Amino acid sequence: MRIRAGVWALLGLLAASPLLAQDAVPDTLSLERALDIARSNNPTYLQSRNDRELADWDVRQAYGQLLPTASANTSVTWQGAGEQTFGSLTLQDLGIGNLPSYYLSTYGVSLGLNLDWSTLRGPALAKARREATSAQIRTSEADLVTRVTGAYLEVLRQGEALRLARQQLENSQFNLRLAQGRLEVGAATPIDVGQAQVQVGRSRVGVLQAENAVATARIRLLQQLGVSIDRSVQLSTAFSLSEPTWTEEELLDRALQLNPGLVASRSSKRAAGVGVSQARGAYYPSLNVSTGWSGFTREASSVSYQVAQAKAQVAGQVSQCNAVNEIYSRLADPLPLQDCTQYAFTDAQQRAIVNGNDQFPFDFQRQPFSLRVGLSVPIFQGLSRQRNLEQARLQQEDATEQVREQELALRANLRIGLANVRTAYQSALLEESNLQLAQEQLRLARERYQLGAITFVELVDAQTVVAQADRDRTAAIFAYHDTVTNLETLVGAPLRN
């Protein structure tokens, strides 16, 4: 009635892995410890758990969309000397000689903010999707628990099968000694001894196959844990056969709250509802605000061109002054002449030109500040908005129906699962009784064989009945635990102590 898990040792065949740096496998491995190791090392589960981090970043990004965007840029340019064109004109046509080469640098800082209903609802949608992702991770964890528990039970199941095979070998060897003893006293024939030897050989084959099955089950367990070990490990969790006392109403109440798949579907339904609200925002206006700061520097490789321009300007002023004085002097009533000496190109002006040219690369001249505010109202976009809204609404309806479908399936599966557990429990009790009867019949058969009342074949038949009854009992016990595991998966919580 009780399977002791610490009987069978797991011999490590795989090389040690760095995955165990933080979750080393202990010498005695309980189911709880195996689940902890699997949560930290199982590759499939770790991949699903990584989705939570991405979902967290999606929430941060959604909040970030509510903040202004900022950018900064700078550039450095060299422009060579020579003739330049402005459309169909050249600098020469404009009366300007060839320009020297220039060094230019610029900077710019801009801020922008775009707000619409979709952006405002972004954090709510990201949170709903993160909740759905967390529910999916819990579903993956529940699946991992089911697979690890099944693999753990499979090792114990195969260990029990190995025990039965070894017990069958011991019984066959006992029968062989019994047949040889009766042959020595003339109470049996060599045929009985030969049959006993054949039975021993078959039992040894059974032990060999059972040992291979234990090794295979162990490897599958390690695969589920996501680790490799190089030492012996014993399973320490005991699974007892206990009468199921849960009621269907109790299990259903817990399952409706805890079933991972149902919780994930409900989270997806809530996310779909927020998606409908976000899609409806395509009909609402959007606001755009932008501003920026910028500046530039411009420095010629040589100031000779600028000095020549300044001198030419002064010479023009002197020439104009002289021309005006000439006109004033020829008037009938001459006007006072202007002082043309005031127009002269001085060393101070030349130094000012030189100093003013010294700008590159950081003596920026700031450009005028600008601020732009815009409001956009969508009017017609080819029915794409309504199509997207209908798609979001239908997705919400699909999610609602999916939740209802899972609730119906959960109710049906719980009723079937609980019935299977109760049936498996009663079957295990009957198989226990059958084993006791078969063992009593084998005891009587051995006594009668020693007395010569039955043949060796009849003794072997009685032993075969015991072996089959023992196998059926073990299978019934593990079938019970398999059905309980399935029921725990449906409920979403452990039901065994």
Image (spheres, grey):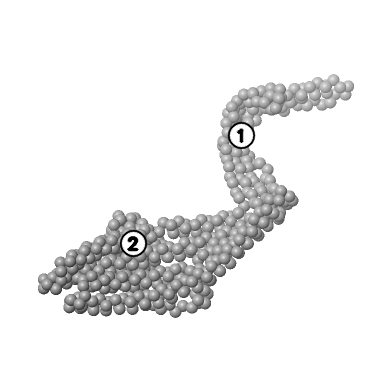
Q: Where's the C terminus, which quadrant? A: bottom left
Residue at x 61% of width, y 43% of height: 108
Q: Which mark is residue 162?
A: none
Q: Position of residue 321 (x, y in %)?
A: 77, 25
* Residue at numbered disc 2: 217
Place of residue 169 in the rendered image (x, y in percent of width and height, measured from the top left):
23, 67
Question: In front of the other: label 1 or label 2?
Answer: 2
Choose between 405 and 62: the one closer to the eye: 405
Element at label 1: strand
Residue 52 vs 292, above or below: the answer is below
Give the image quarter of residue 29. bottom left
Mark 1 vs mark 2, CA separation in Å: 79 Å
The residue beneath circle 1 is: 298
Residue 376 appears in the picture as rendered: no
Mark 2 residue crowding within 10 angstroms, few (<14) / some (14–19) / many (20+): many
| Side of 443 relative to 87 (left or right) | left
Snapshot quadrant of residue 12: bottom left
Taking depth in this image into account, of 280 and 284 the one nearest to the observer is 280
Q: Which residue occupies the foreground of this view, 463 or 89? A: 463
Q: Please report the residue visible at 39 percent of the width from the left and 75 percent of the height from the top.
A: 427
